[in-house]
Image (spheres, rainbow, N blue to C red):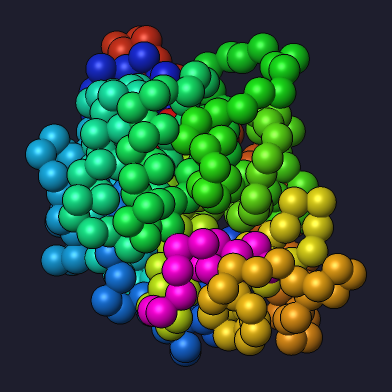
Amino acid sequence: MPSALGTDSGDDSCTPASKSRAKKQDWSRQRLDLDRLHRHTTGAGVTVALVDTGVAPDAPGLGDRVTARGAAAVDCVGHGTFLAGLIAGSGGATPGLAGVAPSARILALRGTDERGQADAGLVAGAVRAATEAGADVIAVAVALPRRDTELTRAVADALGKGAVVVAAATPDPPTRGADDDVPSRAYWPAGEPGVLSVADMLPDGSRPDKALPTSGIDLAAPGAGVVSGGPRGGGHYLGGGASVAAAYAAGAAAAVRATHPDDSAAAVARRLTATAYPADIPQLDPYAAVTTVLGDVRAGLPAASGSRPVELRDTATADRATGRAALFVLLAGAGVLSVLWAVLALPRAPARGWRAAGSGGAGT
């Protein structure tokens, strides 16, 4: 199964349609217990604004639930469409690959150029457009290395209007060579106050080896060996990175907003973090976020010292999925390398001079 083109691949063509189709649910959806979640909510009535490379409105599994503003209706790279499937896709012919909130609507906004390179001005404009449109959740899949005044103001306005803002804690790892000794630093808008900063994790809860270091992470979510669709054809791709994790968290926020419509944005964010699996970085648990009774969540008050008012949860399903997932990712990683080399890289390398993205990024 191929990965979508990386935004730094150097190729001048759009991501081709995948000829591979997944036949069953991947580890990430098992880990998030989405089948169980969907018996309680599918996110109906909630709009998630996705700031990325755009979303193909006619992509399989998204149907008529996508509204794309301007250039966002064209997704050459395919990254935004991949993420939209994780947030709100129905799974199409493979229902097990549905997103976290498969009845939610997607408002697609371009925060990058056509080749997927992020731009602070475009991201700020997209966040403002999402706020003006009344989006319930704003997912920013890009991570900028420098803070931008206009983006800071746009995020503050979005939070002030009641939107839950979720952002990738770091950029996705580059697909063409990188310095292995990258110092820890903050990225934006994930570093803005009130924004849920989300990092990628492996099945065992650790961050991938090539994940860029940063601080202030609020949540971790699956971000390796994740399956979703693209803007062309009905095939599937593998992807990963903090952007994938942020998409899952945005879908979870939509599920919470659908079931707890009176909760403020801050209360929704607290619900997501307070009900996460305990770990060095709390691990997203959408089912618990939707079903757990938190007495003080609406007021956004901290829990009493040394205790957390959450119900006990049966984690056996997730634990079994984690065991299966570890094997899946190991096999998928080896498979992707060989498939990409044989199917994508070799036939096109002489003509194009590019190489396919690795499993560290689905479109970025």
What type of secondary structure mainly makes up the magenta span?
helix
x and y percentages locating residue 135 in the rendered image:
27, 59
Quarter of the picture containing the C terminus is: top left
- Check the image and report above or below for 260 versus 239: below
Stretch in magenta? 261-274
Q: Is residue 344 visible?
A: no
Q: In which quarter of the image is residue 10?
A: top left
Q: Is residue 49 visible?
A: yes
Of the pair 57 and 5, the residue shown nearer to us:
57
Q: Which of 314 and 31 is in front in this view?
A: 314
Residue 28 in the image: x percent, y percent?
59, 61
Going 65% across and 84% down the picture, which residue do you hit?
Answer: 295
Residue furthest to the bottom in view is 39
Find residue 306 and report its horizontal and vertical position in percent.
Answer: 89, 70
> Measuring 40% from the left and 52% from the top, which residue is drawn there?
159
Residue at image coords 30%, 42%: 127
| Image vertical order of residue 208 relative to residue 345, above or below | below
